[in-house]
Image (cartoon, rainbow, N blue to C red):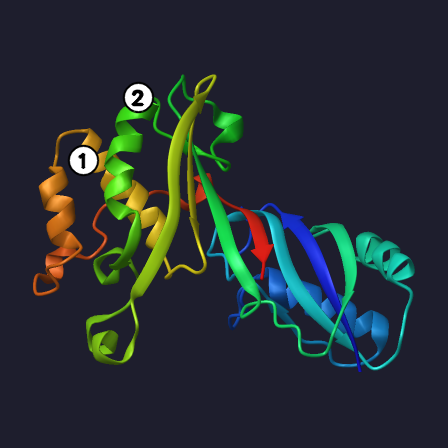
């Protein structure tokens, strides 16, 4: 067997996320169908991150296993041309058979984009059209309460009946925000994330910024798991979220 690591970028607007789902248009299924047709064998790929519906990626990675050897430049050109309808192929690398696109990840950086200027119809699929003033410094101050290792159960999709058997602790190593023209950019980095975790954090931070809750309220949501109405009530839109960068161990 021969193993390759493929780096891609994609616009997630028209997809129901990365992972295959019955009767849904997903990035994984589109890639596997095209490659299975080209290589005349069943192809399965494994990605480093399972982006949700409407979420974009600038640095997604997946592994491709083939029964034959092929020059990586040749494979790059083949993939770039055959997959261009769905994704942009950025890089092809050969990797060892024990390489794992999830377990070998050192960190993942996601970035979230919020338009604080006038409504722009043409960018509504690529940012949160908030269209009101936000101060990056104030957002940055609120973000810092999520720094470090915490139980993010109330900031995830994890259901109550799964609470006992699911580890919802995660360590966030970096959170920061800044403004570029009329866009507020929020960067969050960790080794791994729970489903909806980033969008839940951002939604709650903006809710706090607007004065609808206090920092003390946010801290309680990170420690009090008895109140079911604490579960991600203020989730940010998917359109503003991008898988930005993956670093390897």
For marks 2 and 1, give the CA distance. 13 Å
How far across and down, in percent of the image, does residue 200 sit?
Answer: 29, 49
The answer to which of 134 and 14 lies nearer the viewer is 134
User: From the viewer's perspective, is 188 left or right of 59?
Assistant: left
- Compared to residue 69, the image places residue 16 above or below, namely above
Q: Residue at x 83, y 82 (%)?
A: 67
How far across and down, in percent of the image, does residue 96 sit?
Answer: 74, 74
Q: Quadrant of the C terminus?
A: bottom right
Label 2 sits on residue: 135
| Label 2: element kind | loop
Q: Residue at x 14, y 39 (%)?
A: 215
Q: Quadrant of the N terminus?
A: bottom right
Q: Is residue 235 visible?
A: no
Q: Give the crowd class for mark 1: few <14, some 14-19, many >=20 residues within 10 Å.
A: some
The answer to which of 215 and 183 lies nearer the viewer is 215
User: From the viewer's perspective, is 73 left or right of 194?
Assistant: right
Label 1 sits on residue: 208
Image quadrant where residue 188 sits: top left
- Compared to residue 233, the image places residue 137 above or below, namely above
Which mark is first along the chain, 1 or 2?
Answer: 2
- Compared to residue 119, the image places residue 49 above or below, namely below
User: From the viewer's perspective, is 184 left or right of 150?
Assistant: right
| Label 1: element kind | helix
How far across and down, in percent of the image, does residue 180 sit?
Answer: 48, 21
Q: Residue at x 28, y 40 (%)?
A: 144
Q: Is residue 244 visible?
A: yes
Q: Give the crowd class for mark 2: few <14, some 14-19, many >=20 residues within 10 Å.
A: few
Image quadrant where residue 68 sits: bottom right
Q: Residue at x 10, y 44 (%)?
A: 217
CB atoms of marks 2 and 1 within 8 Å: no
């Amino acid at each position: 067997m021969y193993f390759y690591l493929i780096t891609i970028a994609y616009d997630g607007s028209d997809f129901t996320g990365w992972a295959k789902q019955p009767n849904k248009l997903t990035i994984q299924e589109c890639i596997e169908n095209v490659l299975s047709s080209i290589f005349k064998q069943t192809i399965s790929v494994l990605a480093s991150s399972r982006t949700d519906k409407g979420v974009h990626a600038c640095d997604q990675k997946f592994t491709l296993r083939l029964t034959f050897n092929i020059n990586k430049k040749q494979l790059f050109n083949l993939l770039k041309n055959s997959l261009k309808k769905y994704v942009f192929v950025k890089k092809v690398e050969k990797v060892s058979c024990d390489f794992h696109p999830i377990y070998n990840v050192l960190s993942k950086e996601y970035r979230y984009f919020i338009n604080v200027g006038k409504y722009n119809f043409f960018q509504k699929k690529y940012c949160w059209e908030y269209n009101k003033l936000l101060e990056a410094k104030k957002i940055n101050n609120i973000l810092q309460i999520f720094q470090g290792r915490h139980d993010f159960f109330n900031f995830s999709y994890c259901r109550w009946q799964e609470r006992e058997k699911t580890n919802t602790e995660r360590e966030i190593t970096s959170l920061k925000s800044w403004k570029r023209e009329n866009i507020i950019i929020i960067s969050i980095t960790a080794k791994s994330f729970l489903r909806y975790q980033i969008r839940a954090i951002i939604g709650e931070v903006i809710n706090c910024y607007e004065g609808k809750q206090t920092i003390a309220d946010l801290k309680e949501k990170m420690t009090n798991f008895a109140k079911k109405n604490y579960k991600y009530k203020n989730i940010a839109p998917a359109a503003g979220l991008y898988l930005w960068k993956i670093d390897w161990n």
